[in-house]
Image (tube, rainbow, N blue to C red):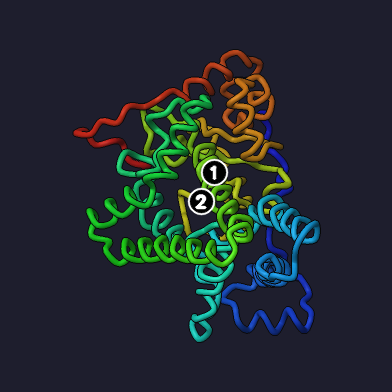
Amino acid sequence: MTIPPVITDPVYDPATRHSALDRFFLRLIRDPRDLPFVYLGLRVSLLLIPMAVLLYMPFVTGWIWWAIALVYLWINNITLKGPFGLMLHCTTHRAFFKKEYGLLNHYYPWVLAPLFGQSPETYRAHHVGMHHVENNLEPDESSTMPYRRDSGRDFLRYYFRFLFTGIFTLSFYLFGHNRKKLAWQAIRGEILFVVFCTVMCFVNAPATIVAFIIPFLAFRLVAMAGNWTQHTFIDPQDPGNHFTNSITCINTKFNHRCWNDGYHISHHIDPTMHWTEHPKFFLENLAEFGRQKAVVFTGLNYVDVFTLLLRDRYDTLADHFVDAGGHFTGRKDELIAFLRSRTVPIPFTHDEELPTAA
C-alpha cells in the first residue's frame, strides 16, 4: 500500500456530550480524554474482585466453583487483560487522577493489577525506568536485539530468561544507574506479590492458582510477546532510531480496545503523547515514516504480526505493509527480503556505543 492510508483508529472528539456521572468523574481525573479508563476500572472492580472472592469461599464448591473459575480466567486473560494492561501503560506514563486525589492513582497498580498477575510497581520500574530510557539497546535488559526475531525457539529463550531472571536483572540495572528508589519499589512490589500468593495458597491453593498465578504467567507471556513484536523489525545499522527499531500497526480493532497501542514508533518518540494523538502524529509525519523505511502494517495487530513471523509468512506481512515512501512499489520480493533483514540477530557491542535515535 503506497498511498497515505485513511486512519480508522480512535481519536478524541471534543464535542462529546457527557452525562451527569461522566461530569462527576471528570472532576477527579486530569484529562477528559481518559474518561473511558474510569469505566474500565469500574468494570474490572465489579467483575473480577467479586469472582476472586467467591473462589475462596468454602461454600462455593463442585461445578459452581469450576464455572466461576473458567469465567474468571476467560474475562481476565482474554476479555480484559489487553484493555486493562494498556490502560495501566497509559496511566503509568501520564498520571490519571488529579493531584488532590492522588491516592487514587495507587488503586490500579496496587489493587487491580495483581488480579492480572502484575506485581505492583515492577511494570513502571521496568517500562519507564529502563525500557524507554535505553530504547531496546544493549543496556535494556529486555532488548530483543540479540535474538532471531522470527524464531519460536529464540522467543522461548527470551521469555523464560525474563520470567526467571527479570526482577534480578532489572534491579541490578536500576541500582547500577543510581535509580535506587525505582529499584526498591520494584523489589518491594515483587516480594509482596510473591508473599501474598504464597500465603493465599495456604488459605486456598486452587483459588490462588486461578485468581493470581495463572494470570501472572499469562501476563508475563503477553508482555514479552508484545515487546518482542514491537521491537522485531530493527535496522542493524541504526538500532537506536525510533523509526527503525519499532513498528506501528494501524486500522485494527486492537487500537480501539487497547488505546492505540499499535502506534509504538510514535510512543517511543514521545512516551507522554496522549493515546488519542497518535493517529494525527502518524499522518502529519507520514513522509518521515516513508523516508526512514519505518515498518508499518495496516489491518494487523501485534498477535497477527507475532504469529505470522513464527509461521514464516512474510508474504502476508508484505501484503499489509504500508509503503509510505514508495520504496517497494511492484517489488514484493524485495519487500520480503527487506523485512527479513530487519529480524536478524544484532550482536551486542559491549565496548562500542550504539547509534542513538535519529
Q: Is residue 75 left or right of residue 329?
A: right
Where residue 297 appears, as percent x and y from the top left, is 63, 34
Task: Identify the mark at residue 306; answer none if there is no mark.
Answer: none
Q: Residue at x 60, y 63 (%)?
A: 204
Judge the density around disc 1: few (<14), some (14-19), many (≥20) Cα neighbours within 10 Å.
Answer: some
Q: Nearer the viewer, residue 195 or 171?
A: 195
- Dot 1 corresponds to which residue? 221
Name the kind of residue labelled 2 in the image. His
**Residue 316 placement: quadrant:** top right
SS assignment at label 1: helix
Q: Which residue is mark 2?
A: 267
Percent x, y of residue 102 = 49, 80
Mark 2 surroundings within 10 Å by alpha-carbon count, few (fewer than 14), some (14 through 19), many (20 or more): many
Q: Pointers 2 and 1 in contact (CB under 8 A)? A: no
Q: Quadrant of residue 180?
A: bottom left
Q: How many marks?
A: 2
**At 66% from the left edge and 40% from the top edge, which residue is drawn?**
301
Residue 276 appears anywhere in the view? no
At mark 2, the secondary structure is helix
**Image: 316 above or below 77:** above
In the rendered image, the quadrant that contains the C terminus is: top left
Please report whichever mark, 2 or 1, sits nearer to the chain's N-terminal start.
1
Work out whether residue 56 or residue 127 is closer to the camera in this orientation and state it.
56
> The disc labelled 1 sits on which kind of residue?
Leu
Residue 107 visible in the displayed image? yes
Residue plotted at (58% across, 26% down): 310
Residue 98 position, x and y percent, is 53, 80
